[in-house]
Image (spheres, rainbow, N blue to C red):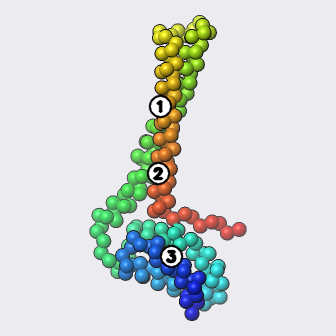
């Protein structure tokens, strides 16, 4: 039988290990389903390498099954608290929707505006200190105060920009852990 090949056994063993979050009975059923898929495809004449390549990387296939079973569990699956499943689905939706939009827009706007205005205030402070401030601009503070405040604004803006990027990376990592990547287009 084709599914007894060492290559297939290694793939299925790695797949089983990647499904560690599933209950043992559910995991065995999913692995048996993939084993049957491999057997059917090779019986139809497909080379084993092509079959395994079409299944994709073990981690991506396991994430796809875990997401599918989270969204639509099998009727014979072991009883899981419904609240647990729904909380995971709601959490996935929440992290990629309105809160993310608000956080990214707010931090991004703060980062951009504080950085640019901080640089402008530093330049104005330097211009005031050398007496090159245009006639239409007035400063009611000492030039060194403007420079220090400008540097502080710039640092706060850069920190907000860094926080925006860090948050987006966090969201991408969370989504990648749950949602499998799309298969590459065949050329």
Question: Where does the N terminus fall, quadrant-wise?
Answer: bottom right
In terms of sequence position, does the residue under pointer 2 or pointer 1 come before the other? 1
- Rate crowding at label 1 as few (under 14), some (14 to 19) or many (20 or more) other CA atoms within 10 Å: some
Whether residue 108 is situated above or below residue 23 in the rendered picture: above
Residue picked out by circle 1? 156
Pick the front one: 117 or 77: 117
Q: Quadrant of residue 44?
A: bottom right
Asked whether residue 39 is in view, the answer is no
Pick the front one: 12 or 86: 12
Specify the label residue 76 is tagged with: none
Residue at x 54%, y 78% (from the top left corner): 11
Instruction: Name the secondary structure under disc 1.
Output: helix
Q: Position of residue 141 (x, y in %)?
A: 47, 11
Specify the label residue 170 is tagged with: 2
Residue at x 55%, y 27% (from the top left corner): 116
How many angstroms separate mark 3 from mark 2 (CA)?
26 Å
In terms of sequence position, does the residue under pointer 3 or pointer 2 come before the other? 3
How many angstroms separate mark 1 from mark 3 (CA)?
46 Å
Pointers 3 and 2 in contact (C-beta within 8 Å) = no
Residue picked out by circle 3? 14
- Rate crowding at label 3 as few (under 14), some (14 to 19) or many (20 or more) other CA atoms within 10 Å: some
- Rate crowding at label 2 as few (under 14), some (14 to 19) or many (20 or more) other CA atoms within 10 Å: few
Q: Position of residue 38 (x, y in %)?
A: 56, 84
Q: Is residue 43 found left or right of 105 in the rendered image? A: right
Residue at x 47%, y 36% (from the top left corner): 160
In terms of sequence position, does the residue under pointer 1 or pointer 3 come before the other? 3
Whether residue 99 is situated above or below residue 160 in the rendered picture: below
Q: Position of residue 142 (x, y in %)?
A: 49, 10
Pointers 1 and 3 in contact (C-beta within 8 Å) = no
């Amino acid at each position: 039988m084709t599914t007894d090949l060492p290559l297939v056994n290694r793939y299925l063993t790695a797949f089983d290990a990647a499904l560690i979050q599933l209950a043992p009975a559910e995991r065995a059923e999913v692995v048996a389903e993939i084993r049957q898929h491999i057997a059917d495809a090779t019986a139809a004449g497909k080379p084993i390498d092509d079959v395994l390549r079409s299944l994709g990387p073990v981690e991506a296939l396991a994430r796809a099954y875990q997401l599918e079973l989270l969204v639509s569990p099998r009727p014979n699956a072991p009883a899981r608290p419904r609240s647990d499943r729904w909380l995971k689905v709601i959490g996935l939706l929440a992290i990629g929707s309105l809160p993310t939009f608000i956080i990214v827009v707010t931090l991004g706007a703060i980062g951009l505006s504080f950085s640019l205005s901080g640089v402008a205030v530093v330049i104005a402070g330097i211009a005031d200190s050398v007496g090159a401030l245009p006639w239409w601009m007035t400063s009611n503070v000492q030039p060194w105060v403007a420079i220090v405040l400008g540097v502080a604004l710039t640092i706060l803006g850069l920190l907000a920009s860094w926080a925006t990027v860090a948050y987006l990376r966090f969201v991408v990592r969370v989504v990648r852990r749950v949602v499998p990547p799309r298969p590459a287009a065949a050329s």
